[in-house]
Amino acid sequence: MRRFSSWLGLSGLVIVMDQLTKFWVLAVLKSGERIELTSFFNLVLVFNPGAAFSFLSDAGGWQRGFFIVLALAVSVWLVLLIRQHAAERLLPAAAALILGGALGNVIDRIRFGAVVDFLDAHAAGWHWPAFNVADSAISLGVALFIWQGLFCTAKEKA
């Protein structure tokens, strides 16, 4: 049980870091405002009512409830997965990162009706869609899931 709570603690840490950074950005920037940090990285405040890469962002509002319900359903599955594999390392770490990121973005959807994004990477005039700490945790978690599935032996997974 101790390992299970540790993995949930990792999810909680992701949520706290995500919400603290968003709180700071909301205090410092106005919507659409940009702060150039380097020649390839800015802070910019945007509200994304859609999913990754602004998918369904102009769908008329129904997507807010859909993404909240979807994230909560996936979160339940992730908690069960973490509990089942708590003694392992890679799989519960991946699930915990995704869980924390999903719940961090759910908090935004409930509070603001959209996800607060603020990290803006760019090069040669091309901008990657703005993202946040929760999105980064989800991306890292998915990468760990893929790594575990492709490169870990059955013995390493157990």
Image (spheres, grey):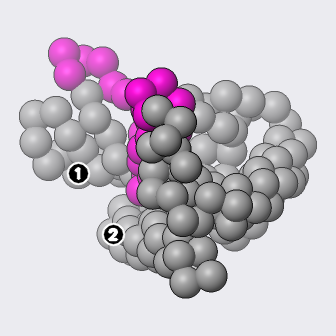
Residue 2 or residue 122, whichever sits in front: 2
Residue 156 or residue 38, whichever sits in front: 156
Q: Is residue 78 found left or right of 93 in the rendered image?
A: right
Amino acid on which the number 1 mark rests in the picture: Ile
Residue at 51 percent across and 58 percent down: it is 88
Q: State the image quarter where residue 101 is shown.
A: bottom right
Label 1 near label 2: C-beta < 8 Å? Answer: yes
Magenta segment: 123-152
Residue at 53 percent across and 76 percent down: it is 3
Expressed as whole percent of the image width and height from the top left, the position of residue 42 reads 24, 44
User: Looking at this rendering, what residue extends furthest in the bottom direction?
Assistant: 2
Check disc 1 and report the residue beneath it: 35
Residue at 24 percent across and 18 percent down: it is 125
User: Looking at this rendering, what residue extends furthest in the left direction?
Assistant: 39
Residue 136 or residue 80, whichever sits in front: 80
Expressed as whole percent of the image width and height from the top left, the position of residue 95 reads 58, 53
Check disc 2 and report the residue beneath it: 28
Principal SS element in the magenta part? Answer: helix
The disc label shown at residue 148, or none: none
Q: Is residue 57 found left or right of 19 in the rendered image?
A: right
Residue at 32 percent across and 40 percent down: it is 120
